[in-house]
Amino acid sequence: MPSSNSWSAPFFAGAMTTIVLSVLFRRQGQEKKGTKGHDTTSRSGSTRSTSAPNKLKPGTLMDTPTLNNRILRKAEGALRLRTSRLIIVVERCTNDHNYSAILRTAEALGVQHVYIIAPQVCESTLKSNRGMVDVTHDSVDSENLDDKNVKLHRSNGQAIKLATAAEVQNRANHHLFAQRAVQWLQVQEFDTTKECIDKLRKDGYHIWSTDLSQEAVTLDEEGLRDDDDTLKERNLIPDKLAIVFGTEAVGCTAEILDASDKRVYLPLRGFADSLNLSVATALCVHQLFILDPTIIGAMPEEERINIRRQWYAKLATQRIQSKSEKASKRRLIATIQRFENMKANVDNPNTPSHQQQIDKVAKIPQLKKELQQLEDDLFAKALTAVEDLVHNPPEPISDMRRADAHRTTYAGKGTKEKNGDAWAGMPATNYYRVEANTSSFFRDRVKATSKDSTEEK
């Protein structure tokens, strides 16, 4: 009778053979794909290794820290993927978080144009033919919150009532936020839905509104083709399309729905009957790109050149100033802000003001003029320095991700320090200083163009 452990020798021999073969096959596969592990140095100086395969296609150009003209290449990469064939229309959004998220979504997905129909006031005592009221108010100086000077109107111009100070402030904040959030976008604001519709029609855009009514069709190939038999012979998506998003509470207005060429929706599969406005925007735009990839990068060359000129000059403007010039500009801005804060007290008849405060407030227009002149001169200098690049741009980055060598997080310094231990060794904490390289590139060009203009004189 054999021993009870006589099976152990062949078992362990077979197990060892399996392990050795699996290791050999794994190494052989990695060598064929060129996926040997590599070390990456994090900001803290520690190293980490990974055996993850490199998925980049041959010839892919990424944003690497040592790439020449990297900031212009990145701008060019974004510009080549920009589209003006699709416009995002946001109707009556009153939530700043949603507003900023939609603009960020548009920029990230490459939609250059966003139309904003301003938030408006609905009076329950006033009924339109569809039970809804389109109300707005006259454009107004954001510093003038006197109810007597501001009236609310219907889209047709009929005066409704005086606006409250809160309503006027809401509009003022809306305009202020728009100015700050559109650095790489073109945002156009409209006081009324009608103005936006008229503009879209004039420019030849079809209007699709997002809607949950039974008149809407699913935003997919089956839904769009079933709704229109002629689509079998042509593209699913019009050559020019504006897609409209209303408020989370009630959606799009009856006015925009009635004017729409189509109503669309994304089917949901849970108990929630709606999505966050910015999330819905991202999903719908991405779905449109899937349905018709030719939308991506669709833009007339003349428009692309004009945007390139503005972008390149803006990037140069941000980098050609010396530290002392930047500090001087910051002081000027801070002074204007301080004097504007005083203005509220000076303008208030119930608050006593000193002559010194009155004199400082009186300087605000001149200080603003100085700041504007400084910015205009800086932009003109930058524009001259990059003009030849506008017509001869560098090769664009083809993968907009940052290379792992400098995938630095956008979190603030305090957040980084707080999470330093937890984030140690993560790729997104890598840091590689590149500002000096890009700054010197633009400064050298400014010097060269200045020298050329001097010699010509």
Image (cartoon, grey):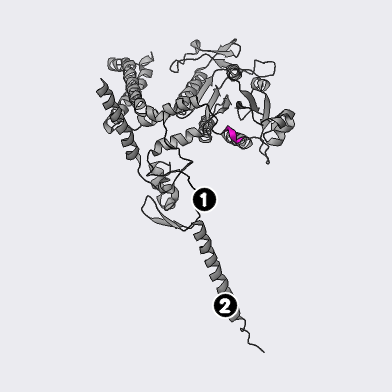
Examine the rendering and report whether any part of residue 214 can be seen: no
**How far apart are the alpha carbons under marks 2 and 1?**
37 Å
Placement of the N terminus among the 4 image quadrants: bottom right
Placement of the C terminus among the 4 image quadrants: top left
The amino acid marked with disc number 1 is Lys
Point 42% across, 33% down: residue: 393
| Residue 165 located left or right of residue 448 | right
Q: In the rendered view, would you say 109 is above or below 423?
A: above
Q: Where residue 139 sits in the image (x, y, percent)?
A: 50, 15
Q: Main secondary structure of the magenta part?
A: helix
Q: Where residue 134 sits in the image (x, y, percent)?
A: 61, 17
Q: Where residue 161 sits in the image (x, y, percent)?
A: 57, 12
Element type at mark 2? helix
Element type at mark 1? loop
Ranked by sequence position, the earlier of labels 2 and 1 is 2
Point 60% across, 80% down: residue: 10
Judging depth in this view, the residue of 398 and 123 nearest the camera is 398
Residue 384 — which label? none
Callout 2 crowding tier (Cα within 10 Å): few <14, some 14–19, many ≥20? few
Q: In the rendered view, would you say 198 is above or below 234?
A: above
| Residue annotated with mark 2 | 13
| Residue annotated with mark 1 | 55
* Residue 294 among magenta residues: yes
Q: Name the front one of labels 2 and 1.
A: 1
Callout 1 crowding tier (Cα within 10 Å): few <14, some 14–19, many ≥20? few
Q: Are marks 2 and 1 in contact (CB under 8 Å)?
A: no
* Residue 29 among magenta residues: no
The amino acid marked with disc number 2 is Ala
Please provide the residue range marked out in magenta: 292-296
Point 37% across, 49% down: residue: 43
Point 50% across, 10% down: residue: 148
Judging depth in this view, the residue of 362 and 210 nearest the camera is 210
